[in-house]
Amino acid sequence: QQQVKQSPQSLIVQKGGISIINCAYENTAFDYFPWYQQFPGKGPALLIAIRPDVSEKKEGRFTISFNKSAKQFSLHIMDSQPGDSATYFCAASVTGAGSYQLTFGKGTKLSVIP
Amino acid sequence: DAGVTQSPTHLIKTRGQQVTLRCSPKSGHDTVSWYQQALGQGPQFIFQYYEEEERQRGNFPDRFSGHQFPNYSSELNVNALLLGDSALYLCASSLSLPSGPVDEQFFGPGTRLTVL
């Protein structure tokens, strides 16, 4: 059972454009939603994270939008740059209740073309 | 400040062999989680170690076992290797407070295991 569904699988965006990656979850107990960025041959790096008590969080060019009723959250990358080309993973976890694992989506490969 | 380190970087084994992977957590962290990332997939949780004990385990067979040492470093052992065990094995470190674990997990670069 895939608890976190991520789309699209791949994304091509022109330099300066907006990249949007979407995730949907099933487990309503999830209360922590991070996004990770992974370059080839490297481990995932934490990019930005949100809790469901807020609907949006912005850090620089990266914004998470969260819709609790729809059980969906998305990553927006503004002014996308070639250096943003990487694979992005959404994840979710249940915190403070004895469950410590991150459940990941399958990833989105982003290519930003000049 | 050193981040999460893992060794070795790459490893090639044959079916039926056993392998040990090592992880040193980020300075100040006391909790280590292990994940398996198959090619083209997201990481999957194997287990987490805290206070030298396995605190939680994902859906992986008993062939996967681990250990945490008093200095918080950790090992992942896989016995009777199968072709399907070929993957990137990631270690993530975090901090556990008396009130509970801190959310953020920081990943190492991984160990690429190839089983022939």
Image (spheres, coloured by chain):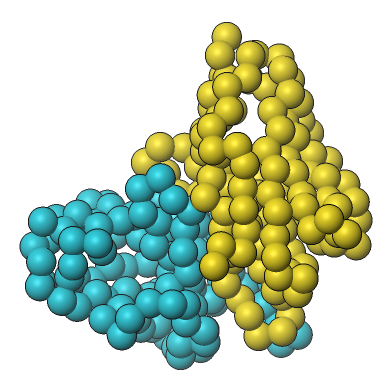
- Numbered marks: total: 0
Whether B48 is drawn above or below A109: the answer is: below
Chain B: give its colour: cyan
**Quadrant of image for the N terminus of chain A:** bottom right
- The residue positioned farthest toward the front in the image shown: A1
State left or right for residue A18 relative to residue B87: right
| Residue A77 on image: x %, y % | 72, 31
**Residue toward you, A45 or B70:** A45
Dividing the picture into quadrants, the one containing residue A111 is top right
At a point 61% along the width and 47% down the height, the residue shown is A6
At a point 19% along the width and 54% down the height, the residue shown is B114
| Residue B8 on image: x %, y % | 25, 57
- The residue positioned farthest toward the top in the image shown: A114
**Residue toward you, B71 or A83:** A83
State left or right for residue A90 relative to residue B54: right
| Residue A36 on image: x %, y % | 60, 48
At a point 33% along the width and 81% down the height, the residue shown is B61
Whether A41 is drawn above or below B94: the answer is: above
Q: Does residue A36 appear in this view?
A: no
**Quadrant of image for the C terminus of chain A:** top right
Whether B9 is drawn above or below A94: the answer is: above
At a point 74% along the width and 80% down the height, the residue shown is A96
State left or right for residue A87 relative to residue A14: left
Chain A: give its colour: yellow
Q: Does residue A5 appear in this view?
A: yes
| Residue A32 on image: x %, y % | 74, 64
- The residue positioned farthest toward the right in the image shown: A54
State left or right for residue B72 relative to residue B13: right
